[in-house]
Amino acid sequence: MAPFGHMAPFGHMAPFGHMAPFGHMAPSGHMARGSHMCDPYSGMVRMLKKLVQFITWPALAGVLAGMVLLQWQTNQRTESVPASVGVSFAGAVQRAAPSVVNIYTSKRIRSRLADDPFLRRFFGNNIPSDRYQRSLGSGVIVAEEGLVLTNRHVIAGADEIVVLLQDGRDSRAAVVGSDPDTDLAVLRIQIEDIPPISMGNPDELQVGDVVLAIGNPFGFGNSVSQGIVSALGRYGLNLSTYEDYIQTDAAVHKGNSGGALITTNGKLVGINTAIYSQTGAAMGIGLAIPSDLALQVMDSLVNYGKVIRGWMGLEVQPLFDGNREQTLTVTAVATDGPAGRAGIQVGDVITHINTSAVVDGRSTMQQVALLRPGDAVEVTLLRRGKTLNLPVVVGMRPESSER
């Protein structure tokens, strides 16, 4: 044996106990290959080798299969992650945010005590003076000429309006015009090199589309919230005369009014206008005026100082027949209005306007409102079982009283 720890190649050992290659043993007890005395041991060795092979290869195959399965499951989990995870809307915000402005208004509230001669006689100049009521909102730059769209209720009655841009510049704003029937207003600011927002098409919106709201909630300028389009064409809320709101769950708070509702491409599709809330805080129901309607109102205010709408001078209610097709029953006719002059009577059932079937009273009223005074339309109606086609010359809708 070599010094402690030294070992010759496996199967060879220094005396005593020198061992020849497996199956050969030195005397005493020298055993020749093939001796019948070694058969049981040789067979056992072969069985053990086969057993090891039988166990090893399936085990290795199982390990490899497990690794492949684990990798596949990992890939599946990665592919099943929602698309929103890891998706950034920074590009859309960067394109649109410079066009969204903060609006600050102040209104002088005259002290009634100051006009009382009796109190002035005793208190002189110590009578409480006038105070100023301040509010805030948002707006959207829509033209390089300094035109800003906002909500009418943001600037109503204000004595002073200040617009603050994202880059820190500010300007006093003049009111170009406002429209109580849609709660929209147009301002003009005197600042050069202002970026108008890119326009989108609200008709392309679908329920479930991701949208972003940008505005000035609680004075936190250029704040962004994200949600989806929850519904389209909301009306009957008695917020304004012409209602066709985009509903979204993007968080909208006090100060967001007049701000932008944009797509994930940074294009304007709505003007944030109202929220449904029992507490004053956002509850997941925000309402925005479609941008195409807002632009129509703006064009009319800029060109005429007011919104000129077509008017027929009648009131209607929807009526469904047995085939579930909708018609409109005339419930009132304005004295000496366009419909009355054309011969339309209470009780008539309107089925078509300019050969287009009526859908509902709201959409029909908006269709007529888009016409210009003097335009002629053909109204198809039923009267006591007979079909009549009456030409009506559209008039101008009377201006609404202030809301």
Image (spheres, grey):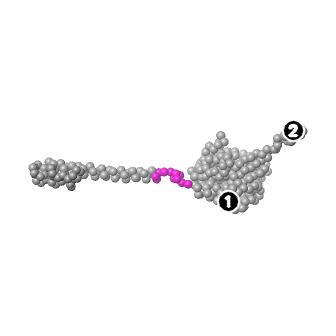
* Left or right, residue 7 beside residue 293: left
Determine the residue positioned at 17% across, 52% down: 14
**Depth order, front residue of 242/108:** 108
Which SS type dominates the magenta stretch? loop
Evaluate whether residue 327 shows in this view: no
Whole-percent x, y for residue 13 in the image:
18, 52
Looking at the image, tell me whether mark 2 or mark 1 is earlier in sequence order: 2
Image: magenta residue range: 78-88
**Depth order, front residue of 344/215:** 215
Q: Mark 2 or 1, which is nearer the eye?
A: 2
Determine the residue positioned at 60% across, 52% down: 211
Is residue 2 depicted above or below 113 in this figure? Answer: below
**Depth order, front residue of 232/70:** 70
Callout 2: 10 Å neighbours few (<14), some, many (20+)? few
Determine the residue positioned at 76% across, 45% down: 133
Q: Amino acid at mark 2?
A: Phe
Whole-percent x, y for residue 218 in the image:
67, 46
Q: Amino acid at mark 1?
A: Pro
Evaluate whether residue 253 shows in this view: yes
Quarter of the image for residue 280 reads: top right
Whole-percent x, y for residue 119 in the image:
87, 38
Determine the residue positioned at 64% across, 59% down: 198
Task: Name the residue that disc number 2 marks.
Answer: 123
Task: Name the residue that disc number 1 marks.
Answer: 196
The numbered mark at residue 390 is: none
Judged from the image, the secondary structure of the residue bearing numbered disc 2 is helix
* Left or right, residue 152 beside residue 233: right
Whole-percent x, y for residue 9 in the image:
21, 55
Magenta-span inclusion, residue 101: no
